[in-house]
Amino acid sequence: MNKQLGKGFVKLLFRHKQPLARKHRELITAFCVAICILVLRSFGLLQSLEWAALDQFFRLRPDEAEENRITIVAIDEASLRQVGSGPIPDKAIAQLLEKLKAHKPRAIGLDIYRDLPVEPGHSNLVKAYKSTPNLVGIELLGHNKNTIVSAPRELSDRDQVGFNNVVLDGDGKIRRSLLYWHDVDNQAHKSFALKLALLYLKNEGIFPQKAAGNYDNLQLGKAVFHRFKPNYGAYVEADSRGYQILSNFPKPACNNLQLESCPFRQVSFIDVLANRVPEDWIRDSIVLIGSTAPSLPDDVLIPYSSRLMGTVQPVAGIKLQAYFISELIAAALERRPLLKVWSDEIEWLWIFAWAYLGVATRRRIQRPCISALSIVVCCLLLTGYAYVAFLDGWWIPILPCLLTFCGSSVVLTYQIAHIQEELKRSKEFLGQVINTISDPIFVKNEKHQWIVLNEAYCQFLGYPKTMLIEKSDYDFFPKHEADVFRQQDNLVLWSQEPQENEEEFTDAVGKTHLIATKRSLHKDAAGNFYLVGVIRDITERKLIEEELKDTAAKLSQSNNELKRKEDQMRYLAYHDPLTGLPNRKYFAEQLQQSLEWAQSNNLLLALLFIDLDGFKQINDTLGHDIGDRLLVTIAQRLNNSLRGTDTVSRLGGDEFTVILRAISNIKVAARVAEKILTTIAKPIVFEDYTTRVSASIGISIYPINSHDCETLVKQADTAMYCAKHLGKNRYEFA
C-alpha cells in the first residue's frame, strides 16, 4: 500500500512539473519594470520630473571662469526715472550708442523693440543706426502680421537684425535656444544671440559652416551644434521647428561683481551716459542693451531660476541672451561641451541595465537593512555618474533609472516574500505526504541542500532529521559518493527531465548499500524548484544478479567448449587428417547432393577418379614420411587447380576424387583433367630430394554414363584403370 502511495505521489509531482524559469526570473522582472517606466516616459508623465533633475544639475554645477566678453547695459528703474519716460526716447538711445561706439566694442546688441519712433530724437537714432555697422537690433517673428514686431528699417536693410523668439517647455522654462527660423515666406532668419556671436567670432577668423559628415548641423570653430529633435532626451513630441539646440547654460563666476548683476558684468543705462563705466568693460566686448526694470517686464525662467528651498527667481530677457551668446562663443573658441543626449536605443538599454541591477542587488543581498543601504548607495552612484556625465555635456536619464532600479527592487522584494511563504507551505505539505511512504525520500533546493526528509530516509542514513536539514551530501557521505549525487542532481536541474541512476550509499555505521535513485524536478505556485529523490535499496537484488551473471557466464563458457569440441569432432569425421581434404564420407554426401542439384537444374556433372602413378615406389624407397608430404603437396595442387564450387576429396592412399558441378559439356571435364595432369607432373622438391609423379584419371559424366552415385563412381574407377593400362599420365572417359 505504501509503495503504491509513493508511486502515486511521484506521478502527481511529475504531472505538475513546469519549465525551469528561475534563471530568467530576474530578467523578466527587470524587463517588465523597465517596460512600464518606458511606457510612462513615452506618454510624457516623467518629463517634468526629468527637467527638474536637469535643472538641479545646472544649479549644482561649479562656477566656471568669469565671463569678460559680455557687458549688459541695463535699463533699470533708476534710468527710467532720470530719463523721465518709458519707453526710453530715441534721443537717449542715440546718445547711448555714441558713448558705446567711442570705446570700440566688437558688437552691440539692442534688445529693445523699435518698430515705431519714440520722440524726441528719432532722426538722431536713425543716424546712429547708419553709423554703427556692428549694431544688431531685434525683431519678433510670428505666423501672422498681428504677432510680428519688425526691426527698424535702417537695420533690417543692412541685415543687422536678429530675432529674439524663445521656445518654452511645458513648465514655462527655457532650456532650448533657437539659432535659425523661417518666416511665413520661408525666408531664413538668424537669432539675436547668433548674430552677435558671429560678429564676435568674425574677429577670431571663425565663420559658420556645415558640419563634416552631417550637413544639416552648424559648425562654429571647434563646436558642432546638433539639431534638437522631438524626442530628444526626456522630451516627448516636443516642438522642434527651426534650428534648435539644447542649451548648456554657463555658470560664470561672480568674482568682483555685485550679486544682482551676476553672472555677467552689468552697468546702468545712466552710468554709461555719465561716463561712470570702466572702459575695458566695453572695449572689444559684446555690449547688450536691454530692460531689467520691473515696470518693463521682460522676465523669463531658466534652469537657474528655481531653488529647492525658496521662491522662483526669473531672469531678465537681456540676461537670457547673454547666456545664449556666452554658450555659443565658449563652444566655438574653447570647445566648451554642448548638451548632448544618447540615442533612444542606448537610453533604453541603460534604463533596462539599472532595472536588472535593482533585482540583482536585491536577490544577492537578503538582509533587509543591508539591502536598503545598498539600494541607497546605488542610487547615489547613479546620481553621481549622471552628474559627472552632465559636466562633460551629456544629459543621460537619471529619474527613469532610479524608478526602474527601486521599482524592480520592490517588485523582487514582494516576489521573495511570496516565494518564502510558498516555500514554507510546500515544505509542510511535502513533509506530511512523504512521511506516509516507506521508501526513503529526500527533497533538495537549488543549492543542493536537504529541505524535507521523510523518516525512512533518516533511518536509512542513520542520522536524526534535525542534523540533516539544510545540509548537503558532502557533509555526510564520502566524497566519491557525494560527487556522483551532485552530478546526478545537476543533470536533472539542467535537463529538467526525470533521471534514474544506480549508486553507492554509505550509511552512518559505514555500511555501503547499492541503491536506485529516481530524481525529478518540481515547482510550486511561487516558482520554487525542488529536486525530489525516491530511493530503493537494491543491495540484495544486485547480489542475486551478480550470482546469476556468474552462473550464466560459466554456462556460456561450457557451451562454447562443447561447441568447439563438437565442431572439432565434426571436422575429423568429414576430413582427411593428413591432407585436410574432405574424406570418403564427406565425398559421398557431396556427390549425392551435387547429383540431386544437377537433376533438378538439368545440368551436367563430371566425376574425376584420380590415382597417382608410381606413388608406391616412392613410399617404399623414400619412406612413409616423404610419401605423406608428397600427398599433402598433391592435395594443395589439386585445390589450386579447381574452382571454388568444385570439390576435391581423398578416398584413401593415393586415390583422389573431383566433383565438377554445372559443366556445359564434356570438353570442360577434359580440360580440367589435362590441367590436373600437368599440375601433378611438375617436380616436387623435398630438401635434398627431388621427385615427380604422374596420375591416371577416369571420368564419368552425369547423365551420360549413369543417374546414380554408385554407378558413376564405379565407371570413373574403371576408366581410371583403363588409363593406367593405356600408359598412365592420361585420362579416359567411361
Image: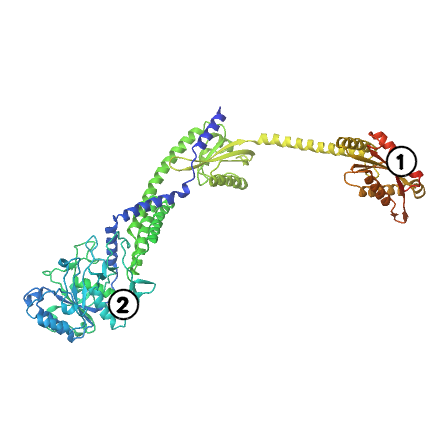
Q: Give SS at disc 2.
A: loop
Q: Position of residue 193 (x, y in %)?
A: 21, 65
Q: Where is residue 172 in the image (x, y as percent from the top left)?
A: 19, 54
Of badges 1 and 2, the one in the foreground is 1
- Check disc 2: other Cα within 10 Å, few if <14, some if 14-19, many if 20+: few
- Check disc 1: other Cα within 10 Å, few if <14, some if 14-19, many if 20+: many
Asked whether disc 1 touches disc 2, contact meaning CB atoms under 8 Å apart, the reply is no
Q: Report the disc number at residue 208.
A: 2
Q: Give SS at disc 1.
A: helix
| 513 relative position to 348: left or right | right
Q: How far apart are marks 1 and 2 (CA)?
A: 128 Å
Above or below: residue 420 compared with residue 378: above
Q: Name the residue under label 1.
A: 719
Mark 1 or mark 2: whose residue is earlier in sequence: 2
Towards the viewer: 644 or 398:
644
Q: Where is residue 553 in the image (x, y as percent from the top left)?
A: 67, 33
Q: Which amino acid does label 2 sit on?
A: Pro
Towards the viewer: 596 or 109:
596
| 48 relative position to 366: left or right | left
Q: Which residue lies furthest to the top in this view?
A: 1
Name which residue lies at 16% across and 69% down.
155
